[in-house]
Amino acid sequence: MSNIAAAAQPGILQPLSVLGRSLTFDLTTQENPRAALAKLQETFKPDWGIVGLGLPLLQALKQNIAGLRPFPSLEGVGCKVPSTQQALWVLLRADDHSTLFERTEKLKNILDGSFILDDALDTFRYRDSRDLSGYIDGTENPTDDAAINTALVADGENLRGSSFVAVQRWVHDLQRFHTFPAEQQDATIGRRRHGNEEIEDAPESAHVKRTAQESFTPEAFMLRRSMPWDKGITRGFEFIAFGNTNDSFERSLRRMVGLDDGIVDALFTFTQPITGGYFWCPPIKDSKLNLNAISI
């Protein structure tokens, strides 16, 4: 393992867990968050999951991490991308619900008084890392050294091994998607559901065409760790993408909504984002969160 990878929160580079729980927290006005973050630093175990700090939290601490900014609110023809920027994001990882419950309770106790839980969503690994539409997600994910170089900050005191993450919740209309003929479904994604083969002559609106990482200048690589979710009545996708900046994700998102060339990603024909946040995921030192970069 490289020195950079060893300094990262391990869940960033590890394969998807069986289960996840994506939680966002708001700041309260009752207490300064500094003490709660110090407690989080001492108590949170790296194998619990991944912690990300949002700009509202850093502003409350009067601290700055270069490159961290609010999630953008974007709008294209017939599509909207909202910003619901929160102070703190935690992705808990586990193989069973009992562990998720216990880690959630511990986390809430650690943060109690300074943070209030705003949202929690259970996620899961579906089949062989497929979206609920049936298509494999993350086919073009970088691996090995390329994953490290893509996802992690390489330089800077107390920054080496940190990462920037974009988190979006998408709500699928699978009933509508399943009315599409099989050819239209494949054309929407830009891959064959069976065999996962990329369609060379897919329309320019196909998701694979809109987000082809090599088609940007500079290339827009990111490390995706997204997971589906299902509440029975509603279902969708918790999109999670790590990078050494959020620039690659944002350029990809702008193209998806048609801001580059007026062509809107065909994904919007059956799914819509309802949340969006950017977070900085601090590195690890001595098996604890390294918060020295924000003076904790």
Image (spheres, rainbow, N blue to C red):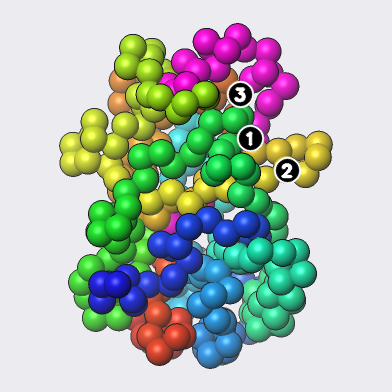
Residue 270 disc label: 3
At 64% from the left and 20% from the top, the residue drawn is 177
Q: Is residue 7 left or right of residue 178?
A: left
Q: Is residue 237 above or below residue 102?
A: above
Of pointers 2 and 1, the one earlier in the residue sequence = 1
Asked which quadrant contains residue 158, the reply is: bottom left
The quadrant of the picture occupied by the C terminus is bottom left
The residue under label 2 is 230
At 54% from the left and 31% from the top, the residue drawn is 135
Instruction: Tell me the amino acid under the disc marked 1.
Output: Leu
Q: Is residue 193 above or below residue 128?
A: above
Q: Say if mark 3 contacts mark 2, CB within 8 Å.
A: no
Point out the stretch of residues depicted in magenta: 165-192
Q: Is residue 91 left or right of residue 58?
A: right
At 30% from the left and 58% from the top, the residue drawn is 144
**Secondary structure of the residue carrying numbered label 2:** strand
Mark 1, Cα crowd under 10 Å, few <14 / some 14-19 / many 20+, is many
**Secondary structure of the residue carrying numbered label 1:** loop
Q: Is residue 57 visible?
A: yes
Instruction: Tell me the amino acid under the disc marked 3.
Output: Phe
Considering every residue shown, the one lying at the far right of the view is 233
- Magenta highlight on residue 180: yes
The residue under label 1 is 132
Measuring from the top left, give residue 123's x and y in whole percent.
66, 52
The quadrant of the picture occupied by the N terminus is bottom left
